[in-house]
Image (spheres, coloured by chain):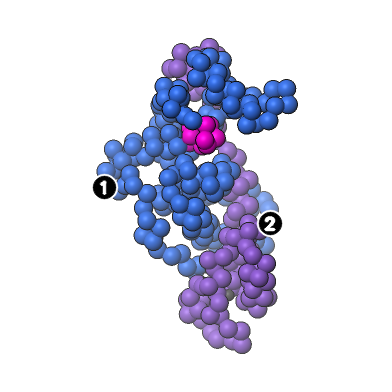
Amino acid sequence: MNAHELHGESHGESHSNCKHLLADLSDYLDGEAAAEVCAEIERHLADCADCRAVVDTLRKTIHLYRTLPQPTLSPDARSRLFAALSLPK
Amino acid sequence: MAVPAVDGASDAEYERNLLQRIQAGDKTACAECIDLHSAGVYRLALRMVGSPEEAEDIVQETFLNAFRTIDSFEGRSRLSTWLYRIAYNTALMRLRKKQPLYVSIDPPAADDEEEITPMQLFDWCCLPEDDFQSNEARSELERAIAELPETLRAVFVLRELEGLSTEETAQVLNVTISNVKVRLHRARLWLRERLSGYFTELAHAAQG
Ligand SMILES: [Zn+2]
């Protein structure tokens, strides 16, 4: 995350960390980031609304695709498969 | 139609037993194997090639090929990992035939993809749950997954939709573990960006 792309105006908090933290967000959301990395991310999130929005919407995105109904092989396709492999149904 | 492990045997024991039976030419064991693994193989194929008919062909080729070469399977990985690998390679061959210029058979290097910088910064999580569960939202999500860059899609499908571990995904795709991690992260950011366009618009429309 580039500070200039993310933040049009400057305010108190330093945003040089946005890009640096981005790389660890997947580990963070998967609970696989080291404790000090989590602490660093959470400290940053407390002060950076843009990164908060990215984390919230990333978490939501992950939840949405994980709960998407999964396509499956139809019974007809299964029959065709068994026939093609000369297997008893 | 999943076949549960019998008599409380562990998954690993069940799989060893199933493998021995398939290698001995037991057709019931082949049928069991198909009922356990064909749905996953089908979904990977479908997400890669996009057409249900072609995905069905790939499932057929995968199991034909798998049962033909089952003696070469040494059981060092899980059976499912091996089947996904055959399916992935089969799908890749077909894609390559169709677009020889765009699909490389070699895994691309990790650094050949651009870094994804979040540009969508509106937090649309506040939308009512109905807006996330609508048919329109689901189609949007399906389209986004279908449009994921080629190099990210298989990693995404195996890790996030099929629930393979990072190690298993690396085995299927013949890439390194760090490559799987990097690509999964990019796929997530890419999808977030893509969905943010849709949901942000929805949120603004709701505000009037
Ligand atoms: Zn930030």
Give the chain of mark 2: B
Percent coordinates x, y for residue B179 in the rendering? 46, 55
Q: Is residue B191 visible?
A: no
Give the residue at the far left of this rendering: B101
- Tag shown at residue B71: none
The quadrant of the image that shows the N terminus of chain B is: top right
Is residue B83 found inside the magenta-colored segment of the image?
yes
Look at the numbered disc 2 and give the secondary structure of its residue: loop
* Residue bearing mark 2: B128
Q: Is residue B66 above or below residue B102?
A: above
Q: Colour of chain A?
A: purple
* Residue bearing mark 1: B101
In this view, the residue in front, B86 or A54, is B86
Percent coordinates x, y for residue B46 in the rendering? 46, 37
Q: Amino acid at mark 1?
A: Leu
Percent coordinates x, y for residue B111 in the rendering? 39, 61
Identify the residue at horizontal 54%, vertical 68% (top origin): A22
Q: Is residue B45 above or below residue B124?
A: above
Q: Is residue B142 above or below residue A51?
A: above
Left or right side of A59 for B151:
left
Q: Sequence-wise, which precedes: disc 1 or disc 2?
A: 1
Q: Amino acid at mark 2?
A: Pro
Percent coordinates x, y for residue B193 in the rendering? 51, 61
Q: Residues within 10 Å of mark 2 (few under 14, many from 20)?
A: few
In this view, the residue in front, A84 or B120, is A84
> Which region of the structure is painted magenta?
B75-84
